[in-house]
């Protein structure tokens, strides 16, 4: 059955969080991280591809010795089609696998895992386990968005940009069927009815 992509023109997508609000909040998170890790170094690990833009803004505001890397994941089994993702969300089997590992040793380092959005929590639960096994000195999580109403795993982020309702959002790195990642504001894709 062909998938209904329902790609809409950008002006049809309502802005949930503006570029100015994002900038202000991300700067505040950078300042908080700078204070929390005063005198120490950090490796930021971004989850591809959605966190790439958040990570690039976040690290530029951190006034510490910092490095960054990326990690990639994919979901096994009932991977949702874009239309399913929009109507029911990311209801995968919970099996996540690594598609790209970091390029450096994390032993004894302060790690901040950077995510675009914390939804069911399945991805972060998996990634925290993977990174904890590398014996870092510390492991924290920064997520731009948090949708706590959808949580299936009791995972929490240490740094949260915005808590949002159960809407499907795009822009500032986040996609719908690989579209809209380049939008500077965060917008809502209306549910299929
Ligand atoms: P989790 O394992 O359910 O927490 O999945 C989080 C991942 O699902 C995010 O990193 C996104 O890639 C994707 N995701 C969840 N909600 C949205 C959304 O509203 N827009 C775009 N991607 C989303
Ligand atoms: Mg996605």
Image (cartoon, rainbow, N blue to C red):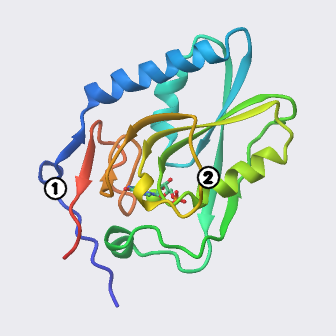
Residue 49 position within the rendered picture, expressed as x and y whole percent measured from the top left: 52, 49
Vertical side of 122 occupied by 83: above or below: below
Residue 87 position within the rendered picture, expressed as x and y whole percent measured from the top left: 31, 72
For label 1, the crowd category at 10 Å Cα-Cα, with few meaning under 14, some 14 to 19 and many 20 or more, is few
Question: In the rendered view, does 172 fall on the left or right side of 57?
Answer: left
- Is the C terminus in the top left, top right, bottom left or bottom right quadrant? bottom left
Q: Report the residue marked by disc 1.
A: 9
CA distance separating discs 1 and 2: 31 Å
Do the numbered discs 1 and 2 sit on residues whose CB atoms are within 8 Å? Answer: no
Question: Which secondary structure lies at badge 2?
Answer: helix
Question: In the rendered view, does 33 fall on the left or right side of 119?
Answer: right
Residue at point 23%, 64% (across, down): 7
Residue 124 numbered tag: 2
Label 1 CB sits under 8 Å from any ligand 1 atom: no
- Mark 1 or 2, nearer chain start: 1
Vertical side of 72 occupied by 31: above or below: above
Question: Which secondary structure lies at badge 1?
Answer: loop
Q: Which is nearer the eye, 162 or 175?
A: 162
């Amino acid at each position: 059955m062909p998938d209904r992509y329902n790609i809409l023109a950008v002006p049809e997508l309502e802005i949930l969080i503006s570029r100015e609000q994002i900038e202000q909040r991300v700067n505040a998170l950078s300042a908080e991280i700078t204070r929390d890790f005063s005198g120490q170094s950090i490796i930021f690990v971004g989850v591809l591809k959605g966190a790439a833009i958040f990570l690039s803004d976040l690290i530029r505001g951190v006034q510490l010795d910092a490095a960054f890397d990326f990690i990639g994941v994919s979901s096994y089994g009932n991977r949702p089609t874009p239309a399913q993702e929009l109507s029911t969300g990311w209801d995968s089997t919970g099996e996540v696998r690594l598609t790209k590992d970091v390029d450096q040793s994390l032993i004894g380092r302060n790690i901040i895992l950077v995510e675009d959005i914390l939804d069911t929590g399945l991805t972060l639960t998996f990634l925290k386990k993977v990174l904890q096994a590398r014996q870092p000195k510390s492991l924290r999580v920064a997520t731009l968005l948090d949708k706590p109403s959808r949580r299936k795993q009791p995972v929490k982020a240490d740094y949260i940009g915005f808590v949002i309702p159960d809407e499907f959002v795009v822009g500032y790195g986040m996609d719908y069927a690989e579209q809209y990642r380049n939008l500077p504001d965060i917008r809502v894709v209306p549910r299929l009815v």
